[in-house]
Image (cartoon, rainbow, N blue to C red):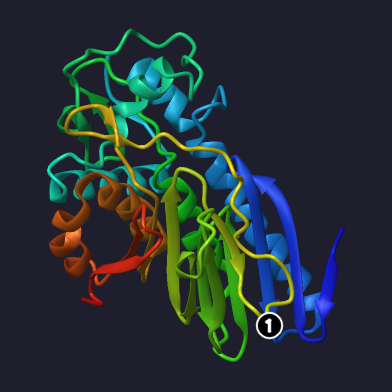
Amino acid sequence: MPSSSRPGRVERARPLLGTLVEIACVGLPSEAAHARIDAAFAVVAEIHGLMSFHTPDSDVTRLNQRAAAGPVEVDPRTRAVLALALELAAASDGAFDITVAERLVAWGRLPRPPAAPEPDASACWRDIELSADGRVRFHRPLWIDLGGIAKGYAVDRAIERVADDRVVRWIVNAGGDLRVAGQGAEPVLLQTDRPTAEGVAMLELEDASLASSRDAPALRAGPGAAATLGSATGEAAAHVDGRNRRATAGDGFVSVVAQQCAVADALTKVVLALREQSAPLLRRNGATAFLQGPDARWRSLGNAT
């Protein structure tokens, strides 16, 4: 039910993208804020419908079923995410690879896609072809999953839909993938499950995005925020190094700050796979990674180093 937890701030939440999506507005009258929040949720719901691994008629499902047999037409937004995913796969030498869905299915993290041909064990991101006419073809049978980038993309599109006034602050958060736009900074508290003072970090986000990946972090809004923002689901996530198809041997938690949330979302997986070797790619994308190791201390990579 719509609510406003403090004067000038309106926020709502809705389950989408396999998590809880929270949208907050600071600086608009309540009625206008709710109307724009409705529009933002509609955008997120559209992205969910296009890119869900679980939805029978999503672009992802249709590609997994048919693209190995011939070109499949997809929504321009799906093509844009695929193009970005392939760009980051090339830049990371395959550490980020959306064709690792077969591993996630084998580990029980994803359901087997219905009516999809058995994937070729040697297939990878290089087997995906994007045509100029908006169609997609797989050169070998494979399964894609956009879970490592689509949430961030949905956040970006929602922000683009509503943030047209610099005197209003917007926060869109999809389970820890969040973007802040407009006037003023939003405090974000990174608090992991390591019970030490070093296990907490505070960031101020202003016209920027943040995404996090780890085995089990908790991401909450910082002091002064009206409500919890970015609460993680608490579920352990399996992240796959696309180069060797193995789960990343993570030692904690990583957050990436970048301009675009889709880029930040994908780069968290790159950092988990490459660690310090990800620094050049982070810098090329104007991004900073905050990485926490077993000692609960934070170190930064990329733009801030």
Taking the spot 35% from the left edge, 69% from the top edge, the residue there is 258
Query: Please, is residue 181 above or below residue 211 in the view?
Result: below
Query: Please, is residue 299 above or below residue 163 in the view?
Result: above
Q: Please state which of residues 64 and 239 is positioned toward the viewer in this rendering.
A: 239
Q: Which residue is mark 1?
A: 224
Taking the spot 17% from the left edge, 39% from the top edge, the residue there is 94
Q: Answer whether residue 288 is visible to the viewer in this image.
A: no
Q: Answer whether residue 190 is visible to the viewer in this image.
A: yes
Q: Please state which of residues 266 and 162 is positioned toward the viewer in this rendering.
A: 266
Quadrant of residue 70 in the image? top left
Tell how many labels.
Answer: 1
Q: Please state which of residues 187 and 74 is positioned toward the viewer in this rendering.
A: 187
Q: Residues within 10 Å of mark 1 (few under 14, many from 20)?
A: few
Q: Disc 1 marks which amino acid? A: Gly
Q: Position of residue 208 (x, y in %)?
A: 43, 75
Q: Please state which of residues 7 and 140 is positioned toward the viewer in this rendering.
A: 7
Quadrant of residue 267 in the image? bottom left
> Where is the N terminus found, in terms of image quarters?
bottom right
Q: Position of residue 87 (x, y in %)?
A: 20, 49
Q: Position of residue 299 (x, y in %)?
A: 30, 68
Q: Position of residue 34 (x, y in %)?
A: 77, 69
Query: Please, is residue 57 above or below residue 219 in the view?
Result: above
Taking the spot 47% from the left edge, 14% from the top edge, the residue there is 112
> Where is the C terminus found, in terms of image quarters?
bottom left
